[in-house]
Image (spheres, helix red, strand yellow):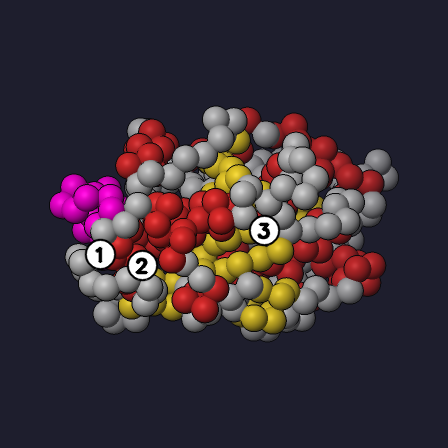
Amino acid sequence: MTPHGLYTGRYAPSPTGDLHIGNALAAVVAWSRAHLRGGRCLLRIEDLDVARTKPGVCERILADLSDLGLGFPDDVMVQSARTRAYEAALQRLIDDDLVYACTCSRRDLAASAPHLGDEGPVYLGTCRHRAVGPSGVDKDSPHVSLRVRVDRLVERFGNPIVHDAWQGVFTHDVVAEVGDFIIRRRDGLFAYQLAVVVDDAFSGVNEVVRGQDLLSSSPRQLLLHRALGNPVPPSFAHLPLILDAAGERLSKRSPQAPELLRTLLQRASPPRVLGHLLHLLGRAQAGAEVSAVEFAARLDDEALKRPSLVWRSL
């Protein structure tokens, strides 16, 4: 747990592939926010999807972060070891009559959804009658996913408004634009939305720094924080996305695989890579070389108040 009042951020990579340059920006900015505030930035390995986790990637992620000069506390959290905590959170939601079992397939969802939300078809609540609990469906029944009743969350806690440090005010109608989202999958794996809320609350994270593509997840995560009894959820700071010349987001599956962080570090020094990121943000000249501490000292909120950046190769 985190001492009260201490700034606590986190960086949470997924070991499904090597870090790309967008991951590097998230890591160094999250670390910088903590460094400037005399706090700490925790490291969490988000390996819930075991089937997609690749051997050796976690070790390479740790090595790349170390090469950049980013230090993290030794108590690294690993999500695959946190199943009991997620089970306890799930049971609390079940006890509050917020969870039901869903048997709908992807084909069913596509056929029944009137429109698409940020992450696919908006679920209409077809299976809401399958409440999970002593008088309903067993939560461990095979071939069902577990969904949370968003309508009841909003009735109890209101529709959340996110005051993001860099992207401004964000809100949407969670019931109409997201719908009842999955918190445990058909294969028994816990969903991202539940796991990150449980872990952030446990670790005392009070600011979440991550990419702008996750901004729309923030309202439902705020609802889960409230439902799980966290009276002071973290604030949010969503980074601009890094795009290629065609306007496509750079990712682990991007055609521009050479822009993986590991590849960049093979042809340029860590200070050169950090300097280039700072240059993209308009806070350094082209060709600059800076340490992680120097990066933090030059960083300011105005440099990050934009939806995206266009990547230019070193």
Of helix, strand and loop, which one carries label 2?
helix
Dot in front, 3 or 1 = 1
Residue at the far right: name it: 135
- Gap between marks 3 and 1, in whole Å? 29 Å
Residue 83 versus residue 129 in the image, above or below:
above
Q: Left or right: where does residue 35 sit relative to residue 131?
A: left
Give the residue type that dot 3 points to.
Glu
| Residue 152 position within the rendered picture, expressed as x and y whole percent measured from the top left | 79, 58
What kind of secondary structure does the magenta stretch mostly adopt?
helix
| Residue 145 position within the rendered picture, expressed as x and y whole percent measured from the top left | 62, 45
Residue at point 33% right, 38% down? 69
Q: Earlier in the sequence, mark 2 or mark 1?
A: 2
Give the residue type that dot 2 points to.
Leu
Q: Which residue is mark 1?
A: 288
Q: Determine contact: label 3, label 1, CB under 8 Å.
A: no
Residue 77 versus residue 98 in the image, above or below:
above
Residue 181 versus residue 244 in the image, above or below:
above
Q: Which residue is mark 3?
A: 207
Residue at the far left: name it: 267
Q: Which residue is mark 2?
A: 278
Q: Determine contact: label 2, label 1, CB under 8 Å.
A: yes
Give the residue type that dot 1 points to.
Ala
- Gap between marks 3 and 2, in whole Å? 22 Å
Q: Earlier in the sequence, mark 3 or mark 1?
A: 3
Could one spot residue 79 in this view of the protein? Answer: yes
In the rendered structure, find residue 233 and report the number of the disc placed on it: none
